[in-house]
Image: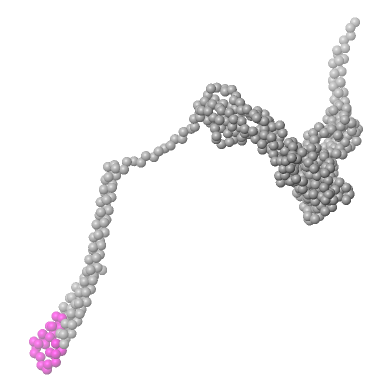
């Protein structure tokens, strides 16, 4: 008899799945590990330099690798140096790198010897740049278990730093020149020729400088090829600048390595990255993609390569026109021409690497898309003819009206002149009449007085004298009246 155990397999399957999930949960719990930044919180003065340690803390079992990205606020903090000399992880899959522009620190480390105790991965030297509350956190962090290689990260614990404004520059100097053990802190290096340690440069010379505290007795400085270099070129008395000459420069990433010594001993080291690329991008070819139709615009394809710093962007010029910037996207660039009349065009593409070196490629492209620019309709104003019948009649009437106005003005002037002359003559007549009648009156009155002095006058003589006086008075009154009438008319 054959026994059928299929029912048993089907009934055990859910149970095995549950046991596997439980085992995975138990394993992950047993292998749990935390990545911590210490100190978790502290207060510093603006301008002060301090250190923080990245530590991994396994729980019960061992770990073999850690990778992380640390985020900090570049407005309040800047990284001065990263030190991995005392790290328990000797294999660095990704060298520790920092960017004070984006506020990031990245690293990836491993150890062939599994670690079970809390250990330091990396020492970070920060500078407090601006007063405020600054949080430092972890992102994209993983911890690999030594036995299985699975990610056993449980928690990431960052730090929060309080930065206060400094009340005295002297107090700040005293606070930042030495660490807790009395040794000098890592130098803060700057260079006008190479201001950004994250950028690439094509220059082959420059000066790096740093501040010297009176307690510094010697300085070790040199140009090194390693990120964790310990400088051996000692300057005593100490120097405060380091000159880079063209014969010292090689392409790639070098490090300006500087260390202070005081009465206690040598302090922390600054290895400032110096990225140099003075070789243009490799020659490249502009290709023409196949046309979808005979009446479509062509598409050009190009892809430049720069071994050292990488391609940054392109500049495209068509037929000597205005250049167009095209960002590099780590792949082949396909650009379709547009708004070009039919004809042949010279296409120039200039590739720039991140240090500013360039390479140029040129090709000729024929365009037969049948495109023409839109023609703007121009409305031309046409003035009407001047010598029409209506215009002639209007001009004639206008001329006649002007002549009439001129004639009336002339008559008015003549009348005003005659009126003025008449007023003048009337005044002269009045003056002459007054003079004549005044003289005549005196003469007649004189004769009348002579006649009336005689002792006896006949009746007729008396009547003649009286009539003469009356006639004189009447004549004078009539002439006065006529003169007044003329004056009234002239008013």
- Specify the farthest residue to the front: 247
- Specify the farthest residue to the bottom: 455
Towards the viewer: 210 or 127: 210
- Specify the farthest residue to the top: 1
Position of the N terminus, as image quadrant, is top right
- Position of 112 compared to 396: left or right? right
Above or below residue 271? Residue 30 is above
Residue range (magenta): 447-472
Residue 469 highlighted magenta (yes or no): yes
- Position of 20 compared to 486: left or right? right
Percent across and percent down for residue 178 are: 84, 49
Q: For the image shown, how many numbered marks are present on the structure?
A: 0
Quadrant housing residue 77: top right
Towards the viewer: 178 or 162: 178
- Position of 31 compared to 316: left or right? right
Residue 351 highlighted magenta (yes or no): no
Percent across and percent down for residue 321 are: 55, 35
Residue 163 in view, yes or no: no
Towards the viewer: 462 or 237: 237
The structure's colour scheme is one colour
């Amino acid at each position: 008899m054959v026994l059928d155990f299929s029912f048993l397999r089907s009934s055990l399957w859910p149970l095995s799945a549950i046991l596997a999930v439980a085992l995975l949960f138990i394993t992950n719990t047993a292998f749990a590990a935390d990545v911590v930044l210490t100190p978790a919180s502290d207060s510093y003065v603006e301008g002060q330099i301090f250190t923080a340690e990245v530590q991994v803390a396994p729980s019960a079992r061992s770990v073999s690798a850690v990778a992380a990205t640390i985020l900090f606020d570049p407005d309040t903090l800047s990284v001065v140096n990263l030190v991995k000399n005392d790290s328990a992880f000797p294999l660095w899959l990704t060298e520790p790198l920092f960017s004070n522009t984006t506020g990031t620190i990245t690293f990836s480390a491993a150890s062939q010897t599994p670690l079970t105790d809390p250990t330091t991965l990396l020492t970070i030297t920060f500078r407090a740049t601006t007063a405020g509350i600054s949080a430092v956190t972890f992102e994209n962090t993983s911890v690999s278990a030594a036995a299985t290689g699975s990610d056993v990260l449980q928690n990431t614990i960052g730090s929060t730093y309080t930065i206060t404004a400094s009340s005295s520059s002297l107090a700040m100097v005293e606070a930042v020149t030495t660490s807790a053990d009395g040794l000098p802190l890592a130098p803060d290096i700057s260079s006008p020729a190479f201001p950004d340690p994250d950028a690439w440069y094509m220059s082959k010379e420059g000066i790096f400088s740093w501040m010297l505290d009176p307690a510094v007795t010697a300085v070790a400085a040199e140009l090194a090829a390693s990120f964790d270099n310990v400088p051996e070129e000692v300057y005593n008395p100490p120097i405060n600048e380091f000159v880079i000459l063209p014969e010292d420069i090689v392409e790639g990433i070098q490090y300006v390595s500087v260390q202070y010594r005081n009465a206690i001993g040598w302090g922390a080291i600054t290895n400032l990255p110096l990225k140099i690329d003075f070789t243009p991008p490799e020659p490249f070819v502009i290709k023409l993609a196949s046309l979808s139709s005979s009446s479509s615009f062509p598409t050009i394809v190009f892809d430049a390569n720069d071994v050292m710093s990488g391609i940054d962007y392109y500049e495209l010029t068509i037929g000597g026109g205005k250049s167009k910037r095209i960002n590099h996207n780590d792949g082949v660039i396909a650009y379709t021409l547009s708004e070009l009349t039919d004809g042949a065009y010279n296409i120039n593409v200039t590739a720039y690497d991140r240090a500013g070196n360039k390479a140029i490629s040129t090709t000729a492209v024929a365009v037969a898309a049948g495109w023409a620019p839109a023609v703007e309709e121009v409305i031309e104003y046409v003035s009407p003819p001047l010598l029409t019948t209506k215009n002639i009649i209007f001009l004639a009437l206008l001329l006649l009206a002007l002549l009439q106005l001129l004639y009336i003005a002339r008559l008015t002037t003549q009348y005003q002149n005659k009126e003025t002359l008449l007023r003048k003559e009337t005044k002269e007549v009045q003056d002459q009449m007054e003079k004549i009648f005044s003289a005549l009156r005196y003469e007649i009155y004189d004769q009348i007085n002579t006649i009336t002095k005689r002792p006896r006058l006949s009746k007729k003589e008396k009547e003649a004298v009286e009539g003469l006086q009356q006639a004189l008075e009447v004549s004078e009154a009539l002439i006065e009246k006529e003169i007044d009438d003329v004056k009234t008319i002239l008013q």
